[in-house]
Image: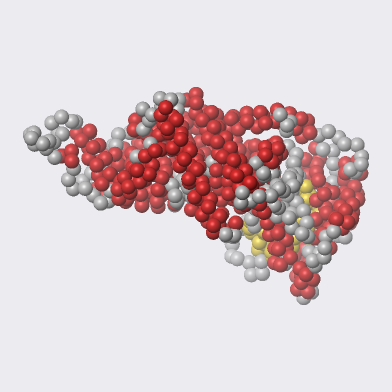
C-alpha cells in the first residue's frame, strides 16, 4: 500500500513524478530521513531490521511531485544474504529510480561508504546524506562534505540530522538538482539503466576488500585520519562505558529483566487510574443514554447501542492508557539503542535453542503486532532460522493480547502480584517460543544456526518527537481497529448474542404444585431481570454455540460465555474482551466493572487458564495470512495454527487442574 502526504494542499503537479529511493546500510537512519522529507511518521528504531518492507511517501518541491521509497538496509547489491537485502537489490536494479539517496551514518563512515562506491560503479544518479551529524560533532568529528563530494567525483553531499529534520530543505534541493540533471540526460537514461541492471559480476572477497580499503581512504579525507584510521588508537566512547554494565554477559541479563519489569510496573501503576477514569466515563455515558432512551422505544436499537457498541467497543477502549504506557516504555528502550544490546545479550540463549541473536529482533517487533514481527524475519539470511523464527513469533504477546491480560490479571490477582504476573506472561511466551524453536530445529528444520552479525548503534538520547510519533501511531492503530474491525465484529457478536429471542422464560413458570407467579413472590425484580437475561443469552446463537463447545473446554474450566468470547478472538484477539463486555452488558444493568463480574463468576483457576490459552493458542487470521505469504507454503500456516492451539489447550488445562489442586479452583 502506498502512503502519500504532500507538503502543501494545491493542484497536482503536471510534471512526471520523480522516483527517489533511499538506500543505505542497516541502522543508517533512512526512515528518519523519509520522515523528514515527507512528514510521515513511520516506525523508527535504534537497531537494525526495522524496515522490513518497502515504505513510500511523497512531497512537493518547487511545483514537482517526488515519490520517496525507503528500502530495507543492505550492505551490498551483490549476493544478497537475506530477503530484505534481496528486496532492496531488486528494486534498485529493476525499478530504475530517478535518484538514489544514499544515507550514511557519520559514525561508521568507512564501512557505509563501501555501498556508496558500488552505487557509483553501477551508474545510479546519487545524492549522499551524512546522517547523525550531531553525534559526529559530539565525538569530535568535523565532516567536510565538500571534500567527500570531490572524492566521489562531484556527487552532491548533504549533512543531516534526520531524527530532528535538520538538513531536510538542503536535501530536497539536492534531490531536485539531481533530478533536473537526469531530465537533461533523459535520452541516454534507458540504456544506462539497463546496463546498471544487467551488471551481475561476481563480488569476490578481494573486490570487497578493495572497495572497503578505498572507502577508508575517502573517510580519512573527509573526517581526518585520527577519527577513522582503524590502525590508530581507539578512544573509549560513552557507549563503551555504558556497555560495560548493561551489555555484560552476566549483569546485562539482570539489567534487561529490571528494565522490562519497570515497563510493566509503570503500565499498571500509572495506567490503572487513567483506565478507571475512561471506564467511569463510558459507564456514565451508557447510564445517560439509558435514562434518555426509554426501553419501550426501539428496544433492539437501544440494546445495540448500549450493549453492542458501548459494551463491546467500550470494554476495549478502557485499556488505551495501559497500551500507550506499555508502548511508550518499549519505544524508549528501542530509540535509545538498548534493544540492540538485548539481542546481543540473548544470542547465547538463542544458540541453545538453535537460533541466533538476530531472531530476537522479529520477536521484539512482534510485541506490537505479530504481522510485522513475522515480516521482520526477512533480515535472517538462514532459511531454517527464518522459518523457525516466523513460526514462534505469535508466542510473543502482541499488542492485541494486552487488553486480555490487563482484564484477567486485575480480575483474579491482587495489586502486588499484577506487575510480576504480566512480566511472567511475557517470559512464558518467550520461553515457549524458545522451546518450540528448539523442537523445530531438531526435527523439521534441522541444521546449524546462521552467523550472528549485528551492528550495535551508539546510545542516543531518545527523541521526544520520534517517541511521540511512534506511540501515537500505535495508539491510533489501536483506536482505528476499535472503530472498524472491533466495532463490526462487536455488532455481529451482539446479534449472535441477541437472536433468536426467547418468548417464554423458565423463571416465569409457576413451580410444580405451587401457586402461580413463578419467582415474583420470592425474588426482587433485579434478580428476575438478570435471570431472564441470562436465559435469553443462553438461548441465542452465541449461547448455543458456546454450549456445544462446553464439553471440549470443560477441562480448562471454561463455560459457554468464555467459549463464545474465544470464537470472536479468531478474527482479532481484542474481541475476547469485547464479547465478554457484551455478555456482561446483556446480563447486568448495573455499573459493576467487567473485571468485578469475572471475579464473581469464575474461580482464579479459570482466569489463569484463560490467560495461558489466549497467550498461546489460535493466532489471528491476519497472522496466519502473512505466515502463509512469507513462508511460501500454506502448510506452514496450518501447522502453526494447529500446533499453537493444541499447545495452548494442553497447557491451559494443566494450569486449571494444578491451580485447583492448590485451592484456586473455588
**Picture residue at 78% right of the left edge, 56% below the top:** 76
Horizontal and vertical percent position of residue 430: 58, 39
Q: Is residue 404 shown above or below 389?
A: above
Q: Is residue 107 visible?
A: yes
- Please tell me which residue lies in front, 487 or 258: 258
Horizontal and vertical percent position of residue 262: 59, 29
Q: Is residue 146 visible?
A: no
Horizontal and vertical percent position of residue 212: 86, 52
Lateral position of residue 12 relative to residue 604, left or right: right
Lateral position of residue 585 relative to residue 83, left or right: left
In which image quadrant can residue 78 be found?
Answer: bottom right
- Please tell me which residue lies in front, 573 or 616: 616
Q: Is residue 246 shown above or below 629?
A: above
**Picture residue at 71% right of the left edge, 29% below the top:** 250
Q: Is residue 113 shown above or below 405?
A: below
Lateral position of residue 449 relative to residue 231, left or right: left
Amino acid at each position: 500500500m502506498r502512503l502519500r502526504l504532500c507538503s502543501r494542499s494545491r493542484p497536482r503537479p503536471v510534471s512526471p513524478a520523480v522516483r527517489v529511493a533511499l538506500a543505505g546500510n542497516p541502522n543508517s537512519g533512512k526512515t528518519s530521513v523519509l520522515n523528514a522529507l515527507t512528514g510521515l511518521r513511520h516506525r523508527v528504531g535504534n537497531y537494525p531490521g526495522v524496515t522490513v518492507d518497502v515504505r513510500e511517501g511523497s512531497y512537493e518541491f518547487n511545483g514537482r511531485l517526488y515519490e520517496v521509497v525507503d528500502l530495507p538496509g543492505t550492505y551490498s547489491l551483490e549476493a544478497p544474504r537475506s530477503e530484505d537485502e534481496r528486496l532492496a537489490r531488486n528494486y534498485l536494479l529493476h525499478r530504475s529510480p530517478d535518484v538514489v539517496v544514499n544515507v550514511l551514518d557519520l559514525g561508521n563512515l568507512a564501512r557505509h561508504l563501501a555501498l556508496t562506491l558500488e552505487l557509483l560503479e553501477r551508474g545510479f544518479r546519487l545524492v549522499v546524506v551524512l546522517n547523525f551529524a550531531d553525534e559526529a560533532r559530539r565525538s569530535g568529528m568535523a565532516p567536510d562534505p565538500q571534500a567527500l563530494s570531490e572524492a566521489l567525483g562531484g556527487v552532491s553531499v548533504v549533512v543531516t540530522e534526520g531524527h530532528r529534520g535538520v538538513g531536510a530543505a538542503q536535501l530536497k534541493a539536492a534531490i531536485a538538482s539531481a533530478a533536473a540533471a537526469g531530465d537533461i540526460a533523459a535520452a541516454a537514461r534507458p540504456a544506462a539503466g539497463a546496463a546498471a541492471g544487467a551488471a551481475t559480476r561476481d563480488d569476490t572477497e578481494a573486490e570487497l576488500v578493495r572497495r572497503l580499503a578505498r572507502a577508508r581512504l575517502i573517510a580519512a579525507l573527509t573526517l581526518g585520519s585520527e577519527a577513522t584510521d582503524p590502525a590508530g588508537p581507539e578512544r573509549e566512547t560513552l557507549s563503551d562505558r555504558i556497555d560495560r554494565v548493561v551489555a555484560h554477559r552476566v549483569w546485562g541479563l539482570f539489567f534487561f529483566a529490571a528494565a522490562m519489569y519497570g515497563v510493566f510496573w509503570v503500565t499498571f501503576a500509572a495506567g490503572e487510574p487513567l483506565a478507571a477514569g475512561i471506564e467511569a466515563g463510558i459507564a456514565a455515558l451508557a447510564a445517560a443514554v439509558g435514562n434518555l432512551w426509554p426501553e419501550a422505544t426501539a428496544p433492539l436499537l437501544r440494546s445495540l447501542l448500549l450493549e453492542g457498541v458501548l459494551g463491546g467497543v467500550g470494554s476495549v477502549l478502557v485499556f488505551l492508557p495501559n497500551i500507550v504506557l506499555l508502548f511508550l516504555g518499549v519505544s524508549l528502550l528501542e530509540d535509545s539503542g538498548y534493544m540492540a544490546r538485548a539481542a546481543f545479550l540473548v544470542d547465547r540463549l538463542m544458540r541453545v535453542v538453535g537460533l541466533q541473536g538476530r531472531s530476537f529482533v522479529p520477536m521484539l517487533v512482534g510485541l506490537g503486532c505479530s504481522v510485522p514481527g513475522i515480516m521482520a524475519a526477512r533480515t535472517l539470511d538462514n532459511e531454517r532460522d527464518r522459518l523457525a523464527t516466523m513460526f514462534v513469533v505469535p508466542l510473543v504477546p502482541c499488542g492485541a493480547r494486552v487488553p486480555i491480560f490487563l482484564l484477567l490479571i486485575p480480575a483474579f490477582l491482587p495489586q502486588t502480584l499484577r506487575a510480576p504476573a504480566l512480566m511472567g506472561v511475557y517470559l512464558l511466551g518467550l520461553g515457549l517460543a524458545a522451546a518450540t524453536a528448539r523442537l523445530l530445529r531438531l526435527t523439521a528444520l534441522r541444521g546449524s544456526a546462521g552467523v550472528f552479525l549485528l551492528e550495535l548503534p551508539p546510545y542516543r538520547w531518545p527523541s521526544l518527537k520520534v517517541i511521540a510519533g511512534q506511540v501515537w501511531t500505535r495508539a491510533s492503530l489501536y483506536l482505528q481497529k476499535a472503530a472498524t474491525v472491533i466495532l463490526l465484529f462487536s455488532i455481529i457478536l451482539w446479534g449472535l448474542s441477541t437472536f433468536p429471542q426467547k418468548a417464554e422464560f423458565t423463571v416465569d413458570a409457576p413451580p410444580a404444585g405451587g401457586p402461580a407467579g413463578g419467582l415474583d413472590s420470592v425474588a426482587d425484580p433485579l434478580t428476575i431481570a438478570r435471570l431472564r437475561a441470562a436465559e435469553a443469552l443462553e438461548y441465542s446463537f452465541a449461547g448455543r454455540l458456546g454450549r456445544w463447545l462446553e464439553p471440549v473446554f470443560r477441562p480448562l474450566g471454561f463455560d459457554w460465555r468464555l467459549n463464545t468470547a474465544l470464537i470472536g478472538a479468531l478474527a482479532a484477539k481484542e474481541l475476547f474482551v469485547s464479547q465478554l463486555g457484551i455478555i456482561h452488558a446483556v446480563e447486568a444493568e448495573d455499573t459493576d466493572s467487567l473485571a468485578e463480574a469475572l471475579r464473581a463468576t469464575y474461580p482464579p483457576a479459570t482466569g489463569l487458564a484463560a490467560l495461558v490459552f489466549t497467550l498461546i493458542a489460535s493466532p489471528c487470521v491476519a497472522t496466519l495470512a502473512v505466515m502463509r505469504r512469507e513462508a511460501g507454503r500454506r502448510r506452514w500456516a496450518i501447522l502453526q495454527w494447529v500446533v499453537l492451539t493444541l499447545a495452548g489447550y494442553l497447557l491451559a488445562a494443566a494450569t486449571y487442574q494444578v491451580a485447583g489442586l492448590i485451592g484456586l479452583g473455588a
